[in-house]
Structures are given as C-alpha cells and as structure tokens.
Image (cartoon, rainbow, N blue to C red):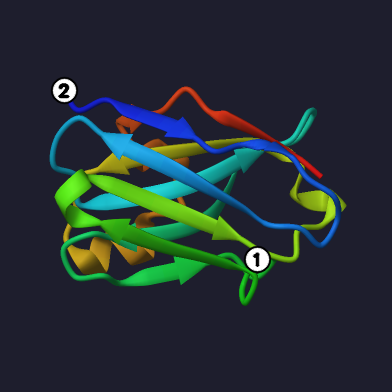
Amino acid sequence: QVQLVESGGGSVQAGGSLRLSCVASGYINCMGWFRQAPGKQREGVAIMHTGGGDTRYADSVQGRFTVSQDYAKNTVYLQMNSLKDEDTAMYYCAAFDASPWVCVTSGWDVYRYNTWGQGTQVTD
C-alpha cells in the first residue's frame, strides 16, 4: 500500500506563507489536503487529480492556497499564502484511486480516502 509523508508545517505570522509537501511512496491519482483544528471536524482544503491536473478548493482558501505536483518525485504540494488565524490546524494529505470526475466530485468526503499521512501542524 502506498504511504504518504507530509512535511513543511510550522509557525507563521498572519499574512505569511508556508508550503506543505506530501511525498507518496508510489503512484497516486486522487490527492486531497484536509485539516483539523482542535474540537472541529476534519475538513477538505484542496483536491487534485494528479493524472489530469484537475483541482478544486474550499471556499475558505480559494485564491490563497494552491495545490501543485512534481510528478517525477511523486510529490504534491500545498502552497499557502496570506495565512489567517483560522488556518491553524493539523494538515493531512490523503489519497485514493479515482477517475478525475470522481476525484473532484467525491474528494471532499473523508471516507473516500484509504491512505492518509501522519499530518503536519500549521500554526498561525
């Protein structure tokens, strides 16, 4: 089974930027970034289908966060700009096999994902 390892979290002032990385041990096609703040449910932040490059963003991060990939390195990135206090959370990447359409339409459902990373903390 593919394993995912996140990195890049840290503490940053409001308005700052961070780039999270998610390295996969093998091929993945539907990748989601999720976050969970203390006492809150895990929520989707961004989705990418690595084959087609289709992406979707949560309204709360649209225009501030960008997901991208380095196909050769099996790595997906989450560039986070203009960070706000409410972005403070543990961030996770997750993956499941899906077509581009299923990925971007069903990828907000945490139960779709069968592979999760260990998480990386972002504090703003």
Please name the residue shown 78% across and 28% down the image: 38
Residue 4, percent across and down? 33, 30
Please name the residue shown 26% across and 70% down the image: 53
| Amino acid type indicated by mark 1 | Val
Please identify the quadrant where the N terminus is shown: top left
Query: CA gap, disc 2 to disc 1?
Result: 30 Å
SS class, disc 2: loop
57 lies above or below 28? below
Residue 80, percent across and down? 61, 59
Where is residue 105, by image quadrant? bottom left
Please name the residue shown 48% across and 48% down the image: 33
Decide which of tag 2 and tag 1 comes sooner along the chain: 2
Where is residue 9, by image quadrant? top right
Q: Which mark is residue 61?
A: 1
Residue 64, percent across and down? 65, 70
Task: For label 1, count other residues whose C-alpha is less than 10 Å away and answer few (under 14), some (14-19) or many (20+).
Answer: some
Q: Is residue 80 at all visible to an observer of this figure?
A: yes
Residue ranking furthest to the bottom? 63
Q: Is residue 78 left or right of residue 61?
A: left
| Amino acid type indicated by mark 2 | Gln
SS class, disc 1: loop
Please identify the quadrant where the C terminus is shown: top right
Q: Is residue 97 at all visible to an observer of this figure?
A: no
Residue 24, percent across and down? 25, 35
The residue at which mark 2 appears reads as 1
